[in-house]
Amino acid sequence: MKRLFLCVQLVAALLAFAPSETSAAPAAPRRERIAVAEPRAVSGVTEADINGISEYLETKLGGQYDIFSRTALKAILGEFKFVAASGLVVDDSLRQQLAQKSVDCLLVYSISKLGSRLSLSMMVVNSSTGEIRRGQRASVTALSLDELIGRIDTALQSMGLLAGSAAPAVKKLAILPVEAASGVQANIPGALHAKLSSFILKSGSFELVSRDDLERIAKESSLVDSHLAASGQFARIGQLQLADYLAVVKVERYDHYEVSGGTAMAGSISPAGRLTIQMTLRIVDVKTGKIIAAESLRDSMRSTDIPAASRRDWTVADYDNAFMERASAALGNYLLMRLDPVLVAAVEGNTVYLTRGSGAGIYTGQYFHVFNPGRQIVHPKTGRVLGSAERFAATVQVIQVAPDMSIAAVCGKAEQPIAQGALCRSAEPSAAGTQYGVPPAPAPQEPAYPMAN
């Protein structure tokens, strides 16, 4: 009898832990619900066109969001007289209505036509707060409706809304057509632009915007001299091309000189000749429209900087080409230093892995000073971050390079352990002349002032 009682208890215990056929499975996390708010039709764009755009957007969003019916949304928006193009949800009653329908956000878009060009702007608005979600805003422009729809996918991708995808990790950079001051040879701006674009593309740090698209937008925006254009116009051009940053370059002067006499030479360069270039570079943050960096860069190259065996039978065009390579490397390295500096990816003993490779001009034998990040320095009144109190850790020398990364060895004894994410600054005295074996600079003293970001 006792044995039977124990068996009954065991069965009861097993049944207690067994899953019930009627018990509900754990609920899957609820996907956000989004609605596409429709704008009013404008001249040259019909209601049928707008319906087509809205349906296309819903199709693309359907893989990532639950879609709230446009018919139901129209009824709510009509009742509360919500103006979709404003991008703001300001009425508390409207917010309550959307909350009751579990609508988390609205994709608000506006479409306009200026001359023959169509422009479409999109933004995601939080239904509960009325705020535009950070990083979820984009504009596209085109000459026809078909072309406009063809560009919507790129805009949705940049906003992180394309079905089954996230926002791209690689930032987009637009390099405006290089401008030139009066007197600069006509072929120099185009050559510098091409080589700078190639340098940035090989670095792997950015995705470049098409030059053809930029030239078209620049002309349509009456951008006669980009060096003198307002920063707001820069931002507008970048927004139309869905860029994160915009680089504005101008060649102020470009000269061939005789070292002995100091006079400019036209169409020739002697073995004792020298080439000089003066350039300005501005970097614009497209989202804010602010110029985040402005630099004047000057570089010179003697003909004797090129090994004699390499420059045998060289023409002026050959020297110009070599110097353009050098000048574009100087521009590219400065740009990367400000937007995507060389960092320490990993450390294994005295071996250091860097986040830049041969694609960005890193070469075997190059030296870097490594700085560990320190505490942030904050403005006492405004709270703005001014920089960080970096501390010198070590000098490293590159011993092996790959297209997107390089391996370096610590020189001597490190001042302190190198941290992952530490900043690497070139130890070369010239940012442009590294390919000619310039000896490394001595290790710096610890900076007595905060280092800017």
Image: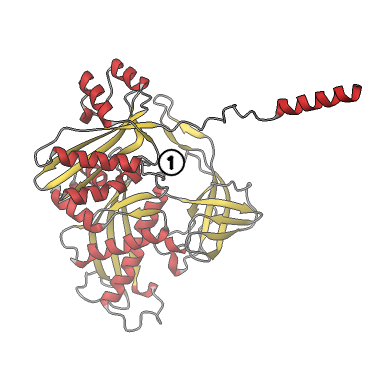
- Category of crowding for the residue at label 1, using alpha-carbon neighbours closer than 10 angstroms: few (below 14), some (14–19), many (at least 20): few
Residue 12 appears anywhere in the view: yes
Q: Is residue 225 visible?
A: no
Residue 223 in the image: state x and y as whole percent. 16, 49
Query: What residue occupies the far bottom of the structure in this picture?
Result: 313
Above or below, comparing residue 423 to residue 278 in the picture: above
In the rendered structure, the answer to whether residue 176 lies left or right of residue 351 reads left
Front residue of this view, candidates 94 and 141: 94
Residue furthest to the right in view is 2
Can you identify the residue that label 1 sits on? 452
Determine whether 427 is above or below 34 in the image: below
Quarter of image, res 34 = top left
Residue at point 54%, 38% (across, down): 374
Report the amino acid beneath label 1. Answer: Ala
Quadrant of the image containing the C terminus: top left
Q: Dot 1: what SS?
A: loop
Front residue of 386 and 351:
351
| Residue 77 found in image quarter | top left
- Quadrant for the N terminus in the image: top right
Q: How is the image coloured?
A: secondary structure
Position of residue 419 measured from the top left corner of the image (x, y, whole percent): 59, 46
Query: In this rendering, would 300 be left or right of 164?
Result: left
Residue positioned 64% across, 28% down in the render: 20
Q: Residue at x 15, y 50 (%)?
A: 144
Going by the image, does 209 lie left or right of 410? left
Residue 337 is situated, as x and y percent measured from the top left of the image, at 42, 51
- Is 157 located above or below residue 77 in the figure? below
Count all numbered tags in the image, as a single digit.
1
Residue nearest the viewer, comparing 24 with 327: 24
Q: Position of residue 422 (x, y in %)?
A: 54, 47
Q: Nearer the viewer, residue 74 or 408?
A: 74
